[in-house]
Image (cartoon, rainbow, N blue to C red):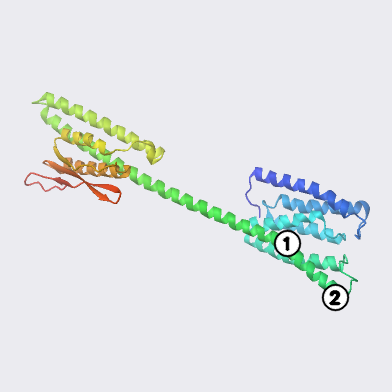
C-alpha cells in the first residue's frame, strides 16, 4: 500500500537512507570482508554485500511511503546475505529502521507482519549464527550451542522487537495528535456556528428595530405632509438618520462575519441613550429609570445582552404599543460580578390587546 507522502518528506527519507548506506557499507566491507568464513570470495562477496545493502536501505528510503514493500525488500536483502554465508553486518541496522516503519506507518496488516517478522527474524538469525556461522562458547559442544542459541535468540528478538515497539509508540502518538486535531476542528466549527447564530440574531434585532422606526416615521410623514410639511421634513430626517445608523450596524455585523467577534465595536450601555432617542422620534416616549451603578464596569457581554434585549423590546413597543414605555435598569450583585436586570413594561391605551 502506498501512503500519501509529501515530496519533501520522501526526499528527506531517501537522502537519509543514502547517507546511512554510504557510512555503513564501507564498515561492512572492511570489518566483515570476504575472508571471514563466508562462501563467497573476492568481488562476488563485495557485490552481494552491496546488493543486500541496497535492498535494505532501499526499504528504509520508502519506509514511510510503502512500509509493506520496505519490509519485503529488507527480507530479500537479509536472505541474500545469509545465502552468501555472511554473519551480522553493520548494514543490518536498516532492518531495525524498517521494522520501526512498519509499526509506525503501516496498515494494520503490515503492523502485524512487522511483529511477526521481528519474532521470526530473531529466531532465524539465532539459528543461522549458531548452525551456519558456528557461533558458540567454549568447546562448542551441543549443550553450549543450545545455550548460545537461546541467548542469541533472546538478544535478536529483543533488538528487533525494540525497534518495532518504538514504532508502535510513535503510531500511538500520531493517532493521539490526529484525534486532538479533529477535536479542535470540531470545537472550532461549533464556535463558528454559535457566532453565525449570534450575528444572525443581532442582524434581526438591528434591522427589525430600524425598520420599525422608519415605518412609523414614514406613516407619520405621510399623514402630516398635507397639513404640517415641517413635521414631514423632520420625519424624513429621522428616517435618514435611522437608516444610516442601521447601515452602520449592518456593516459592523458583516465585518464580524469576516473576522472574529471581538474585532468590531459592540453596543454598550452608553449607547442606550441613542436607542431611546430613536424610539422618541418614532412617537413613543420611554420613561427610563436607572438605579445607581455599582463600582466597576459590567462585562461587555452583559452590556451587549442588555442593549439587544431593550432594542427588541422597544421594537415590539413601536410595532404593537400605543402608549408610554417604562424601562427600569437595576443591578444585581453576585459575588464580585454585577449583572444588569431590565424590567420592561408598556402601558397601553384601552381596547389595545397587543403584547410587547
Where on the picture, by quarter, is residue 140?
bottom right
Whether residue 73 is visible, yes or no, is no
User: Is 294 in front, or is 101?
Assistant: 294
Q: State the mark number for residue 160.
A: 1
Of the numbered discs 1 and 2, the one sitting upstream in the chain is: 2
User: Is 298 in front, or is 171?
Assistant: 298
- Residue at point 29% right, 45% down? 302
Gap in angstroms between the C-alphas marked 1 and 2: 26 Å
Which type of secondary structure does the marked residue at label 2 adopt? helix
In-image side of 264 versus 216 (left or right): right
Whether residue 20 is visible, yes or no, is yes
- Residue at point 41% right, 38% down? 259
User: Which residue is under mark 2?
Assistant: 143
Q: Give the x, y percent position of residue 2.
A: 66, 52
- Residue at point 20% right, 38% down? 212
In the picture shown, does residue 160 fall above or below 195? below
- Mark 1 closeness class: few <14, some 14–19, many ≥20 residues within 10 Å: many
Which type of secondary structure does the marked residue at label 1 adopt? helix
In-image side of 112 versus 253 (left or right): right
- Mark 2 closeness class: few <14, some 14–19, many ≥20 residues within 10 Å: few
In the picture shown, does residue 98 fall above or below 248? below
The image quadrant where one finds the N terminus is bottom right
Q: Give the x, y percent position of residue 196.
A: 37, 44
Where on the picture, by quarter, is residue 41?
bottom right
User: Is 293 in front, or is 280?
Assistant: 293
Dots 1, 2 in contact, CB < 8 A: no
In the image, farthest residue toward the bottom: 143
Q: Give the x, y percent position of residue 220.
A: 13, 32
Q: Give the x, y percent position of residue 201.
A: 30, 44
In the image, farthest residue toward the left: 350
In-image side of 263 versus 245 (left or right): right
In-image side of 323 versus 42 (left or right): left
Amino acid at each position: 500500500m502506498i501512503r500519501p507522502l509529501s515530496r519533501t518528506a520522501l526526499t528527506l527519507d531517501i537522502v537519509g537512507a543514502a547517507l546511512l548506506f554510504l557510512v555503513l557499507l564501507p564498515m561492512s566491507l572492511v570489518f566483515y570482508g570476504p575472508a571471514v568464513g563466508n562462501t563467497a570470495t573476492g568481488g562476488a562477496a563485495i557485490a552481494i554485500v552491496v546488493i543486500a545493502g541496497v535492498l535494505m536501505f532501499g526499504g528504509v528510503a520508502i519506509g514511510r511511503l510503502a512500509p509493506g514493500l520496505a519490509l519485503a525488500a529488507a527480507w530479500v536483502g537479509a536472505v541474500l546475505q545469509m545465502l552468501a554465508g555472511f554473519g551480522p553486518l553493520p548494514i543490518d541496522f536498516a532492518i531495525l529502521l524498517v521494522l520501526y516503519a512498519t509499526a509506525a506507518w503501516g496498515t494494520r496488516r503490515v503492523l502485524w507482519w512487522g511483529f511477526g517478522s521481528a519474532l521470526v527474524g530473531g529466531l532465524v538469525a539465532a539459528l543461522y549464527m549458531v548452525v551456519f556461522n558456528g557461533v558458540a562458547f567454549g568447546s562448542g559442544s551441543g549443550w553450549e550451542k543450545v545455550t548460545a542459541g537461546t541467548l542469541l535468540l533472546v538478544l535478536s528478538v529483543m533488538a528487533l522487537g525494540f525497534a518495532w515497539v518504538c514504532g508502535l509508540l510513535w503510531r500511538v502518538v500520531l493517532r493521539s495528535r490526529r484525534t486532538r486535531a479533529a477535536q479542535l476542528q470540531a470545537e472550532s466549527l461549533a464556535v463558528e456556528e454559535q457566532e453565525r447564530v449570534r450575528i444572525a440574531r443581532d442582524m434581526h434585532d438591528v434591522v427589525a428595530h430600524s425598520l420599525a422606526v422608519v415605518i412609523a416615521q414614514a406613516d407619520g410623514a405621510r399623514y402630516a405632509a398635507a397639513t404640517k410639511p415641517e413635521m414631514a421634513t423632520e420625519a424624513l430626517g429621522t428616517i435618514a438618520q435611522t437608516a444610516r445608523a442601521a447601515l452602520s450596524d449592518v456593516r459592523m455585523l458583516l465585518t464580524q462575519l469576516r473576522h472574529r467577534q471581538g474585532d468590531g465595536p459592540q453596543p454598550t450601555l452608553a449607547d442606550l441613550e441613542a436607542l431611546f432617542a430613536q424610539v422618541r422620534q418614532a412617537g413613543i416616549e420611554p420613561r427610563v429609570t436607572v438605579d445607581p451603578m455599582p463600582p466597576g464596569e459590567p462585562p461587555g457581554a452583559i452590556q451587549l445582552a442588555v442593549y439587544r434585549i431593550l432594542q427588541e423590546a422597544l421594537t415590539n413597543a413601536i410595532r404593537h404599543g400605543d402608549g408610554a414605555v417604562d424601562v427600569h435598569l437595576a443591578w444585581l450583585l453576585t459575588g464580585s460580578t454585577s449583572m444588569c436586570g431590565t424590567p420592561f413594561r408598556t402601558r397601553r391605551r384601552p381596547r389595545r390587546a397587543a403584547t410587547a
